[in-house]
Image (spheres, grey):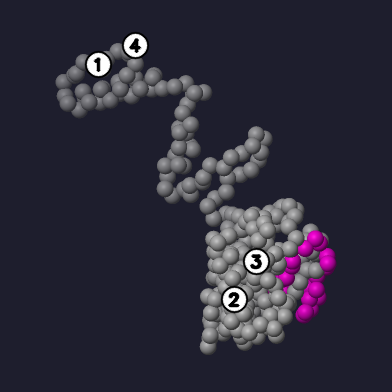
Amino acid sequence: MCEHHAPPPPATPGRRTALTLLGASLAAALGACAEPADQASPASGPAAATLSNPAVPQVAAVPVRPGSQRKPVLPDEGLARRGRARYTPDFRLPPIQNGLAPVLTKIDTKHPVVFLTIDDGVTKTPEMARLMAEYDYPASIFLTRNFVRDNPDFFKQFAAQGSLVENHTVSHNINMVSQLGYQQQLAEITGMQDYAQQQFGRRPTLFRPPGGAYSVAMRQAVAAAGMKAIITWEAKSNAGHMDYQYGKGLRPGDIVLMHFRPEFAADLAAFRAAQHAAGLEVVLLEDFLGVA
C-alpha cells in the first residue's frame, strides 16, 4: 500500500460493517497505486482476458515486420490453407492383397480436388520453392536418390511448406521392369526408402515407377518395402502445357505429373491455369489417402 494513504478507518460496531469499510478502503488504496493508463502492463485489458480463457484458441506469437499487415495464424489454419483436413475423404485406399501393392492412376472422388506430384529432382532452382510457396501448393515429391544427393537440403524447403518426399528409386532405371529381377527392384526401392528416412526423417509410403511402367514383381517389391501404393497418372504438365489421357481438362481426383526441370515455372503455370479453369483445389494426396 502507498505510504501517503491514510490507514483504514477505525472499526465500527458490528463485524459485517467493519469488514465492509476495510474492503472499501483497501480497494481505494490499490486503485491509487496503479500505473497510469499509458503505462499499463501488457497483460492487462482484453488481451489478458483472451489468454486466460481456455475456450479461446491460443495463438502463438508471430513476428511481424514494421508496417506488415500479416495476421496471426490459428493452429489449424495453415493446414486448411493447404487443403489438409478440409475435405472428408470419400475414397478408401485398397489394401495390399496377396503381397501386391495397389496401383492408383486417379482417385475416385466427388470432391473438387486435384493432386499434384513432382518427379526426379535433377534441376534445382530457387524459383521452384518460391513459386510453390507463393501458390501454397502441397505436392507429393517423388525423388530419385542419385539425382538429389548432391543437394538434399534443397528439397527440405518443400517439406517445410507441407509437401512430402516419396520414392522414385535409387537410379531411375526406366527399364527396370524388363531388365531387373525382383531382388534388384527391391534394392532400388529400399535404397531410396533408407535415404529418404536419413535425409528427410520419414519413410515414403508411395512409390512411382520410373517411366510409369510396373509389373507384378514391382508390386510385390513395393509391398515388401512397406509402402502402401504405386502412383501413376492420367494428366501431366510438360513443356509448358497440359496433356490428358482422357478428356480436355482436369477432373476431380486427377493425379497430375510434373518434373523438376528447367521449364518448371511454365509447367506450374499451365497446371495452375487448368486447375483454376476446372474449379479444383490442390490437396495433398497422402492426406487424402490417410498415409501422410
Residue type pointed to by label 2:
Ala
**Residue assigned mark 3:** 145
**Residue assigned mark 4:** 4
Near mark 2 (Cα within 10 A), the count class, few <14, some 14-19 or many ≥20, is some
**Residue assigned mark 2:** 187
Side of 48 where 92 appears, left or right:
right
Which type of secondary structure does the marked residue at label 1 adopt? loop
Whether residues under marks 3 and 1 lie with C-beta atoms below 8 angstroms apart, the answer is: no
Residue type pointed to by label 1:
Pro
Is 253 contained in the magenta span?
Answer: yes
Q: Nearer the viewer, residue 3 or 259?
A: 259
**Residue assigned mark 1:** 9
- The Cα atoms of the two marked residues, 2 and 1, are separated by 89 Å
Q: Quadrant of residue 114?
A: bottom right
Which type of secondary structure does the marked residue at label 2 adopt? helix
Tell me which label, 4 or 2, sits earlier in the chain. 4
